[in-house]
Image (cartoon, helix red, strand yellow):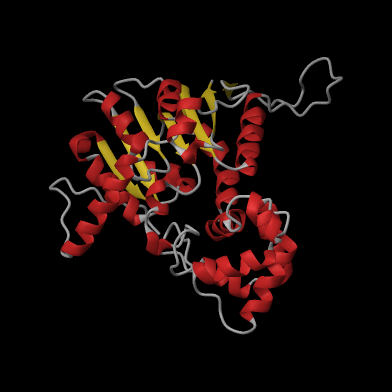
Amino acid sequence: MRSQSIWRSSGWEYKDSRKQRALLQRLEMEFKHTSVLLEETIDNLRIRPDGVYVDGTLGGGGHASRIAEALGENGRLIGIDQDEAAIEAAGLRLKPFEHKVTLIRDNYRNARTALRQIGIEKADGIVLDLGVSSFQLDNVERGFSYKYDTALDMRMDLRQSLTAADIVNQYTEMQLYHVIRDYGEEQFAKNIAKHIVNARADRPIETTGQLNEIIKAAIPAKMRATGGHPSKRTFQAIRIECNRELEVLRDSLDELIDMLNPGGRICIITFHSLEDRIVKTAFKKNENPCTCPPDFPVCVCGQVSRGRVITRKPILPSQEELENNKRAKSAKLRVFEKK
């Protein structure tokens, strides 16, 4: 589908006033959330007032609004998100900066094509805040959270056909086991997959509440008492599978780095060990792409470094942030600078 900017310079208008009220209500909740590792990300971007910056996971616009504030009249921010509700919410939040902001509904994996369609080839900085946003978690009907009983959806892009319910009801037991084990790192993945298959034989699993009860029954009571919410890891795994999150990240990083101007930086916040591993590996490979055997006296493969890793170890949230923002618990920030 062709990327398209949905910014309306004349202002945001809705025919359905209920939709607008609901959006403003959710946006108000998003304002109460501080974006994770916000100051650390902004500091590491080293924003130039006349630069071009891309927020590839716009969400509620937390990082984007700080970038826009730092830009001068000739600076430009491109916000990308595949979630229509996030685009609309960020549009309201970024309204004061509309003359220097372009919003595009798309997946960040298509960033290069999306930017070329608006006449931009390179950027001075890129931000990715991965995973599910607070804005999405608080949007009950989207089915991302195990805290509410609602339709089992979990799509970040509602144009997508595959839902969490499709995964739960159509994947084989072995496929479910691998998804829950690999993406959720859940030690009871095998038993959870078995319980899901047995339960759906009686009736389709259509709600988060149904799935919660099935997961609960699959985990020993003593583990449920001490291991946090029993559904946390399984819900995370199904969401990652539904949105192909790790595949998108793995396939996008080299191209995103290539899009940077010399001296430009990409800042990536992860919340999952597999995400962090993908980012760490890609950054290291782009810094040192040489494939020659280590005992070769000189490089003969011709691979040239594309930049340097700024964060040898990931930047972690401060103790103060951890106390004030529960979502920051597993966050890690890694930064790469283009040569």
Residue reaching furthest to the bottom:
202
Figure label count: 0
Residue at image position (60%, 44%) is: 250
Residue at image position (21%, 38%) is: 98
Out of 337 and 220, give the one closest to the viewer. Answer: 220
Residue 137: x %, y % from top left: 42, 53
Q: Is residue 118 above or below residue 163?
A: above
Q: Is residue 40 visible?
A: yes
Q: Is residue 4 above or below residue 309?
A: below
Residue reaching furthest to the right:
295
Q: Is residue 333 above or below residue 175?
A: above
Residue 111: x %, y % from top left: 43, 43
Where on the picture, by quarter, is residue 63?
A: top left
Residue 203: x %, y % from top left: 58, 83
Out of 195 and 112, give the one closest to the viewer. Answer: 195
Q: Is residue 114 left or right of residue 16?
A: right
Q: Is residue 195 left or right of residue 334?
A: right
Residue at image position (61%, 74%) is: 170
Residue reaching furthest to the left:
10
Where on the picture, by quarter, is residue 172?
A: bottom right
Residue 58: x %, y % from top left: 38, 43
**Image quarter of the C terminus:** top right
Q: Is residue 317 left or right of residue 222?
A: left
**Image quarter of the N terminus:** bottom left
Q: Is residue 172 visible?
A: no
Q: Is residue 337 left or right of residue 77?
A: right
